[in-house]
Amino acid sequence: MIYKTLIIEDEHRLREALSIMLEMVAGENIQIIGYAESVEEATKMIDRLKPDLVFMDIMLKDGTGFEVLQQISFNAFHLIFTTAYEQHAINAFKYSAVDYLLKPIDSQELKTAIDRIAILEERVLEKQQITELQTNVSKTPDRLVLPTQEAMYVVKLEQILRCETSGSYTTFFLTDGRKIMVSKPLKNYEDILLAPVFFRVHQSHLINVNAILSYSREGMVHMIDKSVVPISRAKKEQFFKLMKDEI
């Protein structure tokens, strides 16, 4: 497969070096379709060109690669971070990056990252099977399929304690203690996570009312996993009415 590739890097010599190295380790499998050196330029190019693969420098001249990822509409691409700053690694993998390469980039590490993408592509058949499962699940919505880079998780609705969203990412907190982050906003799941079992108490939070330990008139909900979730002013009246009806 040929991967349409964007390189987001604000230093010209490093862009050139990475281009040459990609040609050496991946050959015809990589087609570089553009370069960007700023948050604004990168955001526009990703949404317009819709690449298969993006090499993303974390520190750009007008911001960070994380800001690019928060602003783009198109996100169906493999992501490899490149940076001179190792302290960004944990945050980088929150965005489901395929790999995290420290500068100066080692050719063998680059090849390993490209090979990892090929392994992910081999899961296409599995994803197709999961898509069929999602279709069947939607007819009888008692469970949810949560896609991540490493696996597809099939979760029963009753296992979901609460959801917390940030930008285009949502984290599901489950009864067994797992946290599953998906690269989709919470609104994508609201048609399945319905009242009276689920209630969106805040723009960033949706909870399972059966997992509520207590709640206060001041607008704080204490969950059985010991988390505390705020109720927005706009949702207070509706939430208290729902709880009253449940009683």
Image: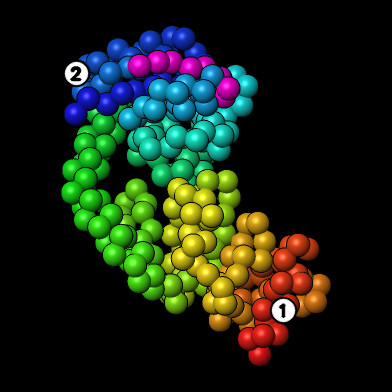
* Residue 90 appears in the picture as rendered: no
Q: Position of residue 113 (x, y in %)?
A: 29, 34
Q: Secondary structure at mark 2?
A: helix
Regarding residue 39, the answer to whether it shows in the image is yes
Q: Image height check: is 193 above or below 212?
A: above
> In which image quadrant can residue 35 be found?
top left
- Identity of the residue furthest to the right in this view: 218
Q: On the picture, is 239 further left or further right than 198? A: right
Mark 2: give few (<14), some (14-19) or many (20+) Cα within 10 Å.
few
Vertical side of 45 occupied by 167: above or below: below
Position of 154 with respect to 245 (left or right) is: left
Query: What's the distance in space between the residues labelled 1 and 2, CA to CA?
Result: 62 Å
Above or below residue 69? Residue 148 is below
Q: Which residue is mark 2?
A: 28
Question: Which disc number belongs to residue 241?
Answer: 1
Q: Residue at x 45, y 48 (%)?
A: 183
Q: Position of residue 121 (x, y in %)?
A: 22, 40
Q: Which residues are magenta?
A: 33-40
The local crowd at label 1, few if under 14, some if 14 to 19, many if 20 or more residues have their Cα within 10 Å, is few
